[in-house]
Image (tube, grey):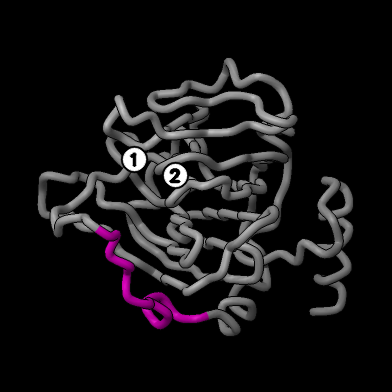
Amino acid sequence: MKHTSLITLCLTLAAFGVRADDTPLLAVPGKVIYENKLDTTPGAPWKAAKGKWELVEGVMRGSELEADKHGAVTRLPNKLQNFVVEYEFKFAGAKSTSLSINAVKDHMARIMITPKSVTIQRDDNDHEGPDKAVVFARFPAELGEGWHKVRLEMVDDTMLGKVDDLVAWGANDLFKTEKAAPGFTVAGQSVDFRNLTIREATLNPAWEDVKATLPKPGEKVAPAATPKGKGKGKKKAE
């Protein structure tokens, strides 16, 4: 039975153009919702809320503007249910970048990346209220020069984040609500982005087996680095 299920899964992946080396984790990718190599001047349907977004050397570059007093942010208007997002990024001097998903009101989830760490988390959903972010994992990392691959999978009440070979997951009731406005953030100058794909997704029938091989939520949480010269005040997520 397991052998038959594996064959069926492989045929499904092939039908949707998913590469054989992209082994399903939480989700099985399906129909493409949005695809863009990010190799043209940024424009509609992207909505840049803050920062400078431009085409540099054939890829999209995001940079924070000092006058904004806020990280650079650009988002798509899509409303999502179960999905997989994949793209590549490269640091070009920035302090951090993230892939962010919004809830109907406020933030929902993100993969936060610095040159020295990768964080997978449920976001603070009210900022001024009692709600707080829940960090499922924070890995030390060495993300120097070159391109790195990011994958975010969300199915029902569960999210999974993957940056290169670092993988973690977590579950929360907030994830059952409508997901919207996937987007990039950049703190500092600059980050390059390319090869974005968003697909519909269904639960991987082998998820329980995959989950058993991954860190439990909260099991791999390295201390957060304190930026030099910064106070202890809480910074609003972008």
Magenta range is 215-228
The spot of residue 57 in percent (x, y) is 72, 31
**1 or 2: tag closer to the N-terminus:** 2
Residue for point 65% across, 43% down: 200
Q: Quadrant of residue 103?
A: top left
Above/below status of 39 relative to 9: above
According to the picture, the residue beneath numbered tag 1 turns out to be 238
- Is the Cβ of the residue at disc 1 closer than 8 Å to that at disc 2? yes
Q: How far apart are the alpha carbons under marks 1 and 2?
A: 8 Å
Counting the numbered discs, the total is 2
* Type of amino acid at the residue the image marks with label 2: Ser
Task: Label 1: state its secondary structure.
Answer: loop
Quarter the N terminus occupies: bottom right
Q: Is residue 114 left or right of residue 163?
A: left
What label sits on residue 80 in the rendered view?
A: none
According to the picture, the residue beneath numbered tag 2 turns out to be 100
Quarter the C terminus occupies: top left
Q: Is residue 226 magenta?
A: yes
Residue for point 30% across, 27% down: 68
Task: Label 2: state its secondary structure.
Answer: strand
Q: Is residue 90 magenta?
A: no
Residue for point 63% across, 77% down: 210
The front one of 4 and 146 is 146
The front one of 202 and 152 is 152
Query: Main SS type for the magenta part?
Result: loop
Outermost residue, top direction? 44
